[in-house]
Image (cartoon, helix red, strand yellow):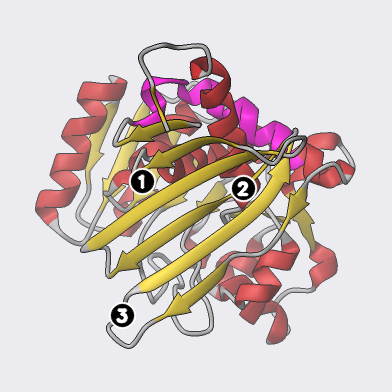
Amino acid sequence: MLFLKEMPVETIIPMSQAIEAVEESLAETSRGNAVVLPRRRIHHANRMLFGVLPGSVKGAMGAYLQTDRDRAIHHETVILYSVETGEPLILFQDCAINELRTGAAGGVGAKHLAPPGARRVAVIGSEKHAFTQLQAVCAVRAIDSVRVFSPTPAHRVQFADRVRAKLGLDVTAEESAEAALETADIVITATNAQRPVFEGRSLRPGMHVTSIANGDKTRVREEIDRDTIRRAARVCVTSKATVQANESDLFRAVRDGVLDWDGVSELGDVVLGNAPGRTGPEEVTLFKLQGLGIMDLAVGLRAYEALKDSRSVQRL
């Protein structure tokens, strides 16, 4: 078994390959060729969380495992096994697979739902997931300008500096979410917010929104408001079963009659053409992104294929 510790997976496979891997895994799920089980979390009295995301795709089975306490303590493990032999293939310890695959999923959503000519992005949030979401959007659209808002002025300035240095984009740190959205074609929300970070009524026709915050019955996350959901002509998720199992904000919207499950599509079906993506320039589209174990496995499998014959990787 190969063992990697604290080696960012993006140094092994680029974002473009991660997007390909995640898109393929979602398509395989919709074809019935992959196994997806919803996330399960254990919450402890000291606020420590243990999360498990299992799955199986393309001859590999395994899971993403997470420990977290208010983001002050955070570790992730991804382990892959062979479906044929049952042997462990590779173990990743704190290799930032989750950041890369979540960004890649946002890239798949933008590829199929964002306006083809989108060039301007608003980012609400300033941490690692905000950057990888933007990085992935840049891989599927010709982005030339970014506006970022974070409640902490130093954080939004630091994020803007990173975007300039790493992505070479024109970027402005804004003092409000409204200012960030003012000219955007694509809106990315990547926060830990418990209240909506912008008002849905401020969305203009044709905009695409990617929201990644998903809590559960014991940990509420709510980045987007009900107006955003109502205004979306197209609402996509990675997995309806995961939304239902975790009772996140989209689940609550359906429960409260804001949305009907018939109005929600899985992104894999959109990839395959079995459900519509963007069908008109004036549509507001929403991708509510939930993590799936098969996305971690798909990215991990790409990395494994690139490394399996290497003599420089540790073996257990």
Of badges 2 and 3, the one in the foreground is 2
Res. 277 in view: no
| Secondary structure, magenta segment, majority class | helix
Locate residue 114: give its quadrant.
top right
- Residue 256 lies within the magenta run: no
In what element is the residue under mark 1?
Answer: helix
Compute the Cα span from label 2 to label 3: 26 Å
Q: Are marks 2 and 1 in contact (CB under 8 Å)?
A: no
In terms of sequence position, does the residue under pointer 3 or pointer 1 come before the other? 3
- Residue 23 lies within the magenta run: yes
For mark 3, does the 10 Å Cα neighbourhood hold few (<14), some (14 to 19), or many (20 or more) residues?
A: few
Residue at position x 19%, y 48% from top? 156
Q: Which mark is residue 47?
A: 3
For mark 1, does the 10 Å Cα neighbourhood hold few (<14), some (14 to 19), or many (20 or more) residues?
A: many
Q: Which mark is residue 114?
A: none
The residue closer to the viewer here, 290 or 287, is 290
Which portion, as a residue range, is magenta? 8-26
Of badges 2 and 1, the one in the foreground is 2
Q: Position of residue 67 (x, y in %)?
A: 37, 63
Q: What residue type is labelled 2?
A: Gly
Res. 82 in view: yes
Residue at the spot of label 1 = 130
Residue at position x 49%, y 45% from top? 78
Residue at the spot of label 2 = 62
Residue at position x 27%, y 70% from top? 70
Q: Do the residues labelled 3 and 1 touch (CB within 8 Å)?
A: no
In terms of sequence position, does the residue under pointer 2 or pointer 1 come before the other? 2
Residue at position x 47%, y 84% from top? 218
For mark 2, does the 10 Å Cα neighbourhood hold few (<14), some (14 to 19), or many (20 or more) residues?
A: many
